[in-house]
Image: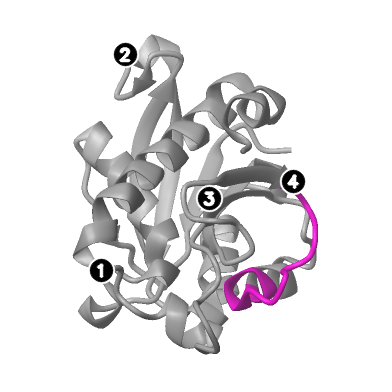
Amino acid sequence: MSRSWLVIGLGNPGPRYDGTRHNVGADVITELCRRAGEKLSSARGQRAELARIRIGSAGVGVPAADAQVVTVMRSRTYMNESGVAVRKVADFTGITPDHLIVVHDEIDLDPGRLRLKCGGGDNGHNGLKSIRAHLHTGEFIRVRVGVGRPPGRQDPADWVLARVPAKQRADLDVQVALAADAVETIITEGLTAAQNRFNS
């Protein structure tokens, strides 16, 4: 069992995918780094961008005596190969699945809703499917960020890979901030407390 934490924000690499629904998990990592005053950087030998931040009872960036050092990452692989990067980083850091948090988009939740849970299937999400395959377990914490289903007959893949319209972006930014709050709460107070506060 690990004492440190690894937080993964799922998304696709490159500017083409910035601002898309599928990258909301990666956006949460960016927000956690912003709060901590840290920047992601490419890790030698890893297929990911990583940062080490401090999270304690007062939130991100608290004094060392009251903080846990947390590794946060964005994969440099495409979504369906996320597990390759996660496995390499988990092996390198020695962090086990019980201390792994994956933040991802969820089309079966309406926009504005969060759902936190441990374990379960991948529900058709290729990033989760890849992580489960490479870790040989699904027993890790998920922070599911609602993006809703597409209107009409639009292909769900096209929906999640589309950029969020400007008029909806402010609402999504609020959701990203709440998801970052949820990650902090999981680490400082535990999953049950975070579920009671953020599950909607």
- Distance between the alpha carbons at the discs numbered 1 and 3: 38 Å
Q: Is residue 125 magenta?
A: yes
Q: Nearer the viewer, mark 1 or mark 3?
A: 1
Numbered tag placed on residue 63 in the rendering: 2
Q: Earlier in the sequence, mark 2 or mark 3?
A: 2
Q: In the picture provided, is 155 more to the left or to the right than 137?
A: left
Write the residue at 66% across / 22% down: 193
- Contact between marks 2 and 3 (CB within 8 A): the answer is no
Q: Name the amino acid, label 4.
A: Cys
Q: Which residue is mark 4?
A: 118
Write the residue at 29% across / 58% down: 168
Q: Name the amino acid, label 3.
A: Thr
Q: Name the amino acid, label 1.
A: Pro
Q: Earlier in the sequence, mark 1 or mark 4?
A: 4
- Distance between the alpha carbons at the discs numbered 2 and 4: 29 Å
Q: Which residue is mark 3?
A: 93
Q: In the picture provided, is 2 more to the left or to the right than 165?
A: right
Numbered range of the magenta stretch:
118-130
Q: Nearer the viewer, mark 3 or mark 4?
A: 4
Q: Which residue is mark 1?
A: 165
Q: Earlier in the sequence, mark 1 or mark 2?
A: 2
Q: Look at the numbered disc 2 and give the secondary structure of its residue.
A: loop
Q: Earlier in the sequence, mark 3 or mark 4?
A: 3
Q: Earlier in the sequence, mark 2 or mark 4?
A: 2
Q: In the picture provided, is 188 more to the left or to the right than 61?
A: right
